[in-house]
Image (tube, grey):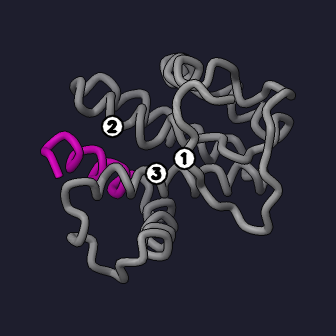
Amino acid sequence: MTEAHDHVYAHIRAHFPELSAKTDARYMRYEAIGDDFEAEEEIFTYLWLERLADILNFEMTAGVDVEKLTPVFEALVDMLDWNAETLKCIDVAVVENLFYQVKPAAAEPYWNVFPGRLQALYLRFFGRPPTDPSRTFIETDEFVPLYVPRGLP
């Protein structure tokens, strides 16, 4: 982990312990490494932040109060100014995984409070907001993050 990644990870853990605990559980399950967080040291923060995005998506799909997630979005946008490496990490690991499988109507209240700089990163990658009714969804029984290459709908 780089120093910039360490700071992102530590900042989220310090300010959002309940969300971090959920993310830890998701990370351990999804990455299948048990509780050995050092197993993937070079890419750990990216993978952990992707699982954070999963948890945020679960929360949005469940209709959690927007005010509960707003501080997380604000913390992410504040960290964008730390340095270029932090910006890239948040963009690639979090923003590009947010709103996955969150239906447009469910996404709307969260998108409305999603900070403008994060919206810009999201729109640069996806080309349309998560509130766009033309977005397609994969019907599954379980929320499973999938990789969608840049440029695909």
Considering depth in this image, is 16 or 45 the residue closer to the camera? Answer: 45
The magenta segment is 1-15
Q: Earlier in the sequence, mark 3 or mark 2?
A: 3
Give how far across and how far down residue 145 sits, in percent. 59, 55
| Res 84 → quadrant | top left
Q: Which secondary structure lies at badge 2?
A: helix
- Quadrant where the C terminus sits is top right
User: Residue under circle 3?
Assistant: 50
**Residue at left 21%, top 25%?**
83
Secondary structure mostly taken by the magenta-highlighted segment of the chain = helix
Q: Which secondary structure lies at badge 3?
A: helix
Dot in front, 1 or 2 = 1
| Res 14 → quadrant | bottom left
The reply to whether the C-beta atoms of the residues labelled 3 and 1 are less than 8 Å apart is no
User: Residue under circle 2?
Assistant: 89
- Label 1 and label 2: CA atoms lie apart by 16 Å
